[in-house]
Structure formats: C-alpha cells, structure tokens
Image (spheres, coloured by chain):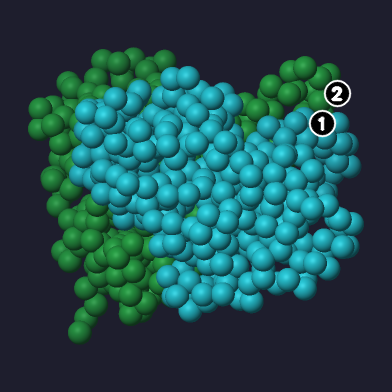
Chain colours: A green, B cyan
Amino acid sequence: MKIIVDAMGGDYAPAVVIQGAIAAVKEYNIDVVLVGDEERISALLKKNKYRGANISVCPAQEVIEMHEPAAASIRKKRKSSIVVGLNLVKEGKGDAFFSAGNTGAVVCAGTLSLDLLPGVERPGIGMVIPTLKGISLIIDVGANIDPKPNHLLQYGIMADAYLRHILNRPEPKVGLLNIGEEESKGTEFVKETHELLSQSSLNFIGNVEGKDLFSGKCDGIICDGFVGNIALKVSESVGEAFQEFLKRYIKSSPLALLGVALLRNSFRKFKKDTDYSEYGGAPLFGVNGVVIIGHGRSNVNAIKNAIRVAKEEVERKFNEKILEAINPAK
Amino acid sequence: MKIIVDAMGGDYAPAVVIQGAIAAVKEYNIDVVLVGDEERISALLKKNKYRGANISVCPAQEVIEMHEPAAASIRKKRKSSIVVGLNLVKEGKGDAFFSAGNTGAVVCAGTLSLDLLPGVERPGIGMVIPTLKGISLIIDVGANIDPKPNHLLQYGIMADAYLRHILNRPEPKVGLLNIGEEESKGTEFVKETHELLSQSSLNFIGNVEGKDLFSGKCDGIICDGFVGNIALKVSESVGEAFQEFLKRYIKSSPLALLGVALLRNSFRKFKKDTDYSEYGGAPLFGVNGVVIIGHGRSNVNAIKNAIRVAKEEVERKFNEKILEAINPAK
C-alpha cells in the first residue's frame, strides 16, 4: 500500500512531516511517497538517517501557504504539493493522500481531482474528539459551511459507517448539534435535518447540545461546518485560557508550584487521554479516494497516526461501505 | 427604584431567588417586587428573617417551566410570573425585570409586552464572559437564531453602547465571530455582516475565530444566536469534562490529592476570576424596558448581581443610549 504525503503541509513542515512518515513506514507495513521540495526532503531523510526503500520522493515545485484562499490557490498553483499529491491518487499511483496543510485547499482540490463518491452531494470533514466515555466523531468541522439538510443526513450516514468500520462501534448513536434537546428547537434548517435523520435507519438519538460535546452522550455528532468549526476552536480556546489563568496564580506561590509538581502525573494522563495526535488526522468524507487532513500544528505522532488512519480506511475499503450506505440496494 | 423579580424562575427557585433579592435590597438602594406564589414567597421571606419594607410581593398563580415552548407557554399562561412581572414594567409599576427562568419565554414575553425600541429590528441576549484580559461581551447567545445581517450590525451597536456606558470601556473593540480571520471567510450571511460592520462607525476589528473567545482579543463579539449558544455551551462542556477527567486520575493517587490541596488557592482564584455569578445576568438588548435574564443555575450571588445590573441599566439610562446610537441624528 502506498500513502501519498504532502511533505510541505503543516506549521512544522517539512521536517516534522518527514519524521512522521519515517515513523509510519517503520511501524506499519506501507510505502510513503513524500511530495514537495525534492532537495529539502532528501536532505531531511538523510539527516534522519533514513536509508530504507519504503519512502520515495515526488517533486512538487510550489507550496500552498496556510492562509491562501482555497479555490484560487489550487487554480494558480498546479505544481503545489497538494495538487500534485492528489493527482497521484487520482492516477492510481497511490492509495491515499494525507496533508497537514491548508485545509480549504485540500477539500477543494480533493473534491475537484478525485470527485465525489456517486450519490454523495458534498464532502465533509470528520474529527475524532476525546470525551468522558472514550471518543466521538464530529462532522462537519469546516468543509461545508452552508449545507442543505440532506448533506447533514449524508454526514450522519458516513459517520455511522466510520464509527462501525474504522472505530469499531457496533451500534453507534448519532445526535444532531442544536440549541436545545426538544424537537421543536433550532432553525428551520436544523428542524428539517432533524426530520430527515429521524426518518433514516440511523440510530438517531435526537438533538444534543453544546454541553454534550465532550460528555460522550453520542458517538457521532452532526452539524454544519460553520458551527462545527466554531465549536472545536472554542473548546481549544477554553483549554488554553485555563492553562494561562492557572500559570498566573501559580507563579506567585511556591506551594502552588509544589502542587503542580505533585499533579504532574495526573496532568500527563489527562494530556494523553485527550491528545488529538493519537487519533491522527481528520478524514475527508465523501470524496472518491482516501484523503486525511491533519491539524496545522501536527507533531510527529499526529503525522504517523494520520498515516495509520489512511491505511485503515484503504484496508477496510471504507469508501465501499459509504457507497453501500448512501445508495442502498432497492 | 423598583426592580421586578420573577421569584419562580431558575433551577433553585423560589428559595435562592428570594435570598438573592434580600441580599440586593440590603446592598443597593432599591425596592424589589417578587412575583409568584404569594404563600411560598411570604414563608421564605419569613424563614430568611426579612422584615424590611423594600420587598413586596405580587401574586402570580402560574409558572412557566424551564423546558416549555416559549411562544405557546406565554400565550397559555397569562398568569405566569414572567408574563405578570413584565406587565408590571409595561404599566410603569416597575423600572426593570429580572428572571432566571425559561429564557425563550422571557425573550418572547419581553418583546411582546414591552415592544422593541424604535429602530431596533430584533432583540438579542448579551452575555459577559471572563477572558484573559478581563471580560468581554458576546451577543447574541440565543434570542435570534436565524438573523439578518442588519440584526447583527444592530447587536454591534448595542454591544458598543453597553461596553461604553455599563462596562466603562472607552473605545470598545468589536469583532465578528467567524471561521477565519480573512474577510473572504464564512457564509454569505457572515460576509454581508462583515461589510455592514466595516462601513459602520464602530471600532470594528474584523473577524475573530472561536479560539479568540476567551483571549480577550476584542471587547464585543458579535454572532448569530445559534452559534453563540453553541459556543457558550461548548465552553461549559470543556470545563466540566476537564474537572471530571482530573477527578478520575486524582482519586487513585494520594500524592495527587495533596497536590490538589496545595492548589486550592489557585483554583479558588480561578473560580473567582471566571465566576459568571459576579457579572450577574445577561441583558436582553433592544426591548423598550430593562430586562435581565439569569442562568437557570443562578446562585444567590448571581441573582443579587443581576439585580445590580438591572439597576445600573436604569440609572445610566442605557436604553436612551441605544436609541441615540441606533437612530443617529442626521
């Protein structure tokens, strides 16, 4: 199996991406093609003392920066690592694509280059998040910010398939993110979506609220990409603010510093239990090929695990499951 | 000054509401009218040994429960504490209304009974949140879940007025909650809102992301009520999940327990710095009267401070400032 990796994508690219790829080929039985600046990649492979045959390099002269507008950048930069890498998958020269680069550009280029799976109307980004009961999947977190109710129904169906076939949940519960639990709550859009989900064969538990995001009340949380993006980033914000507040108080107290030292193990466990890098990247659902998107801040572990997720999707023929679920035999 | 208080609203009503009202009349130079079940209120006033002349009771036979549908409940329950209390303000028998009850019902009844301020198109709920730089105001957090761009412009104008005249910020910075900082980001709705805010005389700093919610990047954060509600509830969820996670680790370690003990002061400071009950309730902006909404979980301190906020809005003639700002002299 050959995973195509955007060597130039992410805040710490290419160095960290290459280290993650090396870790992945050592741990999993796969080949990786690193796409990007050939000279820099070769130098970094040498620097990391990688001499195996499982990593090859495909040159790409351009890089789409993190904040370039998605559609315009992929039109202009046909030789970018994202466009070149996705074309390799399209041409059958690779089984999956991973990038921790510009998310919008990956969504856009992924959809254009690989096309959507027959029957799927829009792509969606799924994100695995830690909860008090393990993990949940939230979809969409930013691919489709102005969706139709039917797109969210399809996200529900794809989330169900992912939860069953990749995350090994036998009867996944799916909830709709809303401002209240009652059926009557929310915008017209959300109410229509609620109805579609209710009529579907999904194990739909109804509306869930923002406060349920990390409670583990359901396995799959469905929302539009705008709300999903805000929800995720707000949760990051709370964590960062909390750390910053605590730092301030602790600075001025030696006893508090000792307290933190004694809690180091607990904090470490917390960090491990909630470490996004363990879950790898976020799958781009609905495109006709396997595409995994990494957080811009991905570290070596996150890159390695994202490549593992790509491998699992390919191995378990995840897109065939989606096709069956979206287009059930009549 | 006379503040009308819904004695029956909130998870711990009427006991906690009455304690909060007693604390308020002792601390501030005001009168309070408690609206609700006369017998229970009188018994509770006696139980709390209140014998002053600053609190009176106005009977209301019905109670709108927390999860009743807003519009239907205020139509059906004309004798509820919310409807009766707001009518007192309408008839000039009180200067402001406070309730920690059913938010939707307060918004609905407040708008119907008091009407909107001339020029204001929709009411909005503002919420003061703690940030790393002090406090910020986020509006709307649930009154208007499917707004037009102009409603958000008006929220910006009302937030600016509140920040200047109630929170004493001389040059408040206003930001628009979006999925990216670039002007080109977001839905058509958000882009149109961005343009309106840019053309306004507000100190508009552009888009802010979910991760900026608690950073204190701007003083006023504008968003639609659906997104605002989800954002707030997600942030509560993160805090609760964090506590729950830590509890689990700590249980199994005596050293960690000692660590927590040593950090007690820091946690206490954190709790104080981020204690919503210090900021009182959430003002319902745009109605022709002063209406403050409390969190369902309001404690005595929150009730007391919400009554203080109501008093400040009346004293500082806040609605006149809104009128001037929304309808500038030509």
Disc 1 residue type (three-letter): Asn
Across and down, in percent, residue A119 comes to: 17, 66
Q: Nearer the viewer, mark 1 or mark 2?
A: 1
Q: Are marks 1 and 2 on the same chain?
A: no
Instruction: Decide if residue A186 is on the left or right side of residue B10.
Output: left
Give the quarter of the figure containing the C terminus of chain B: top left
Q: Determine the image quadrant of residue A305.
A: top left
Across and down, in percent, residue A292 comes to: 33, 45
In this orientation, which residue lies closer to the viewer: A17 or A275? A275
The answer to whether residue B9 of the structure is visible from this angle is yes
Label 1 element class? helix
* Residue count near mark 1 (Cα–Cα under 10 Å), binned few <14, some 14–19, many ≥20: some
Task: Return the chain for callout 2.
Answer: A
Circle number at residue B265: 1
Residue beneath the point at 86% across and 31% down:
B262
Disc 2 residue type (three-letter): Leu
Find disc 2 in the rendering and name its residue: A255
In this orientation, which residue lies closer to the viewer: A96 or A279? A279
Task: Return the chain for callout 1.
Answer: B
Badge count: 2
* Image vertical order of residue A223 relative to residue B70, above or below: above
**Contact (Cβ within 8 Å) of mark 1 with mark 2:** yes
Residue beneath the point at 29% across and 36% down:
B327
* Image vertical order of residue B77 relative to residue A100, above or below: below
The answer to whether residue A225 of the structure is visible from this angle is no
Outermost residue toward the bottom in this view? A330
Label 2 element class? helix
* Residue count near mark 2 (Cα–Cα under 10 Å), binned few <14, some 14–19, many ≥20: some
Residue beneath the point at 77% across and 17% down:
A252
Across and down, in percent, residue A286 comes to: 25, 57
